[in-house]
């Protein structure tokens, strides 16, 4: 094998392993963050209190299928688009995707606020408690920002920047754990919902800022931001 070919294989392998490694770290940290609230409720309150939180959480979480389907398509679309078109076109597509996703989840949030309590009453019957509706409404507040965050992840990953999302998740994990513990102790089960809304909101704003930083860097000189790219 020609030495230049070996060097090419090494470079490609290094980039693939780096991308996949950071992607795995990001997913593991994200999964830990998403499951932490239930463990905190069980340890600080009781196991039965987990069901009070889990039911409205799952009720709201089902709406995330919509934005999940959109961003699943967005990732390969943005990946292919960046190879064929300039930064301005990619920025326009990313902006449109973000607006559509946030609009769809905003409509879902409005629906939960308007009829969520009635649906939960019908679903749970005699087991319904007012706190179920309170938690569902609280969680719904973060749905538009959740959509913004997921589209930002698709954009960053399309450019190969899994390192950025992984580092953000690693920073977020201990901060969120502390926040959730404080709020659950202060407000009981609804405190877990408050901490989830704060986490999702801050995470989305951070991801959006990284995406805008990356777009501005590419528009300025055609090169990615060094911190985001990990180079």
Image (spheres, rainbow, N blue to C red):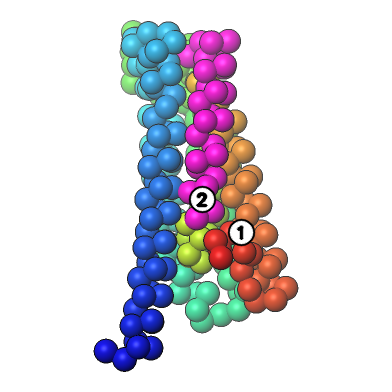
At label 1, counting other C-alpha atoms closer than 10 Å, the crowd grade (few under 14, some 14-19, many 20 or more) is few
- Marks 1 and 2 close (CB-CB < 8 Å): no
The residue depicted at 55 percent of the width and 23 percent of the height is 178
Report which quarter residue 38 is drawn in. top left
221, 191: nearer the viewer: 221
Pointer 1 or 2: first along the chain? 2
Q: How many marks?
A: 2
Which element is circle 2 on?
helix
Residue farthest toward the front in the current orientation of the protein: 3
Q: Is residue 92 above or below residue 186?
A: below
Q: Which mark is residue 227?
A: 1
The residue depicted at 59 percent of the width and 50 percent of the height is 207
114, 66: nearer the viewer: 66
Q: Does residue 58 appear to the left or right of 96 in the view shown?
A: left
State how far apart marks 1 and 2 are (Cα): 11 Å
159, 60: nearer the viewer: 159
List x then y, in percent, for residue 37.
Answer: 44, 24
Residue 188: say if magenta. yes
Which residue position is annotated with label 2? 165
Please provide the residue range marked out in magenta: 163-189
Magenta-highlighted stretch: main secondary structure? helix
List x then y, in percent, for residue 64.
Answer: 43, 42
Report which quarter residue 195 is drawn in. top right
Which element is circle 1 on?
helix
Q: In this view, does 40 lie above or below 9?
A: above
């Amino acid at each position: 094998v020609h030495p230049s070919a070996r060097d090419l294989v090494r470079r490609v392998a290094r980039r693939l392993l780096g991308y996949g490694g950071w992607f795995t770290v990001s997913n593991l940290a994200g999964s830990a963050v998403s499951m932490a609230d239930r463990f905190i409720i069980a340890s600080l309150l009781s196991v039965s209190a987990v069901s009070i939180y889990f039911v409205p959480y799952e009720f709201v979480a089902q709406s995330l299928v919509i934005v999940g389907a959109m961003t699943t398509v967005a990732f390969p679309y943005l990946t292919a688009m960046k190879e064929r078109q300039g930064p301005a076109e990619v920025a326009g597509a990313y902006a449109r995707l973000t607006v559509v996703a946030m609009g769809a989840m905003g409509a879902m949030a409005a629906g939960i606020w308007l009829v969520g309590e009635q649906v939960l009453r019908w679903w749970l019957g005699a087991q319904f408690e007012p706190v179920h509706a309170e938690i569902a409404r609280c969680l719904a507040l973060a749905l538009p920002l959740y959509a913004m965050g997921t589209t930002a992840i698709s954009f960053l990953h399309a450019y190969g920047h899994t390192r950025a999302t992984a580092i953000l998740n690693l920073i977020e994990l201990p901060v969120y754990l502390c926040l959730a513990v404080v709020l659950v102790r202060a407000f009981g089960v609804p405190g877990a919902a408050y901490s989830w809304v704060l986490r999702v909101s801050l995470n989305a704003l951070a991801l959006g800022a990284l995406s805008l930083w990356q777009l501005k860097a590419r528009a300025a000189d055609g090169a990615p931001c060094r911190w985001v790219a990990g180079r």
